[in-house]
Image (spheres, rainbow, N blue to C red):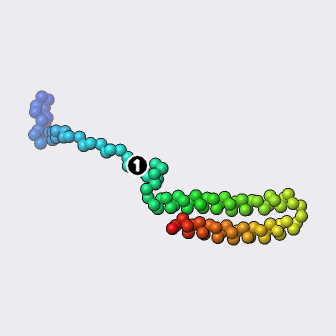
Amino acid sequence: MNATPGAAPDAGSDPAPDPAPGPVPDPAPGPVPDPVRDGVPDDPVAVLVGRQLRQALRTVGAVAALLAGPPVLAMWVPDPRAWVVLSLAVQGVWVALAVLQLRRAERLER
């Protein structure tokens, strides 16, 4: 099957014609808004997680102040007994922070 110039191509070698274009489907109406990212949280779980995160960050801030505060205070007080007093006071504050965090977390979950 030699092809000669100007001769008609073989019937079996023609590509199939493209179908006529039909109606173009409508594009999507747009992205679905994310309720948490858009500032309108509808999901109660997302609201609870956000509140718990804010509470945990406040507690972390209090713990950081508790860790950094006594050494700074002890530097200003030259008496070595200040370390003993501050160490005992820190333990009481640790317990109070733990109880407060537990109560707030339970209250948030109700």
User: What is the secondary structure assignment of the residue under circle 1?
Assistant: loop
Taking the spot 46% from the left edge, 54% from the top edge, the residue there is 41
Q: Residue furthest top?
A: 6
Residue 27 percent across, percent down from the top left: 30, 42
Residue closer to the observer: 76 or 51: 51
Taking the spot 10% from the left edge, 33% from the top edge, the residue there is 8
Label 1 sits on what residue type?
Pro
Query: In the rendered image, which quarter is residue 75 located in?
Result: bottom right
Residue closer to the observer: 69 or 14: 69
Left or right: 87 in relation to 53: right
Asked if one can make out residue 18 in the rendered structure from this viewpoint, the answer is: no
Label 1 crowd (10 A; few <14 / some 14-19 / many >=20): few
Residue closer to the observer: 3 or 35: 35
Residue 81 percent across, percent down from the top left: 87, 68
Taking the spot 87% from the left edge, 60% from the top edge, the residue there is 77
Query: In the rendered image, which quarter is residue 84 located in?
Result: bottom right
Compared to residue 110, the image places residue 37 above or below, namely above
Residue closer to the observer: 13 or 43: 43
Taking the spot 10% from the left edge, 31% from the top edge, the residue there is 7
Asked if one can make out residue 44 in the rendered structure from this viewpoint, the answer is: yes
Left or right: 25 in relation to 31: left
**Residue at which label 1 appears:** 33
Left or right: 109 in relation to 92: left
Query: In the rendered image, which quarter is residue 80 located in?
Result: bottom right
Left or right: 21 in relation to 99: left
Residue 36 percent across, percent down from the top left: 46, 53
Residue 106 percent across, percent down from the top left: 56, 69
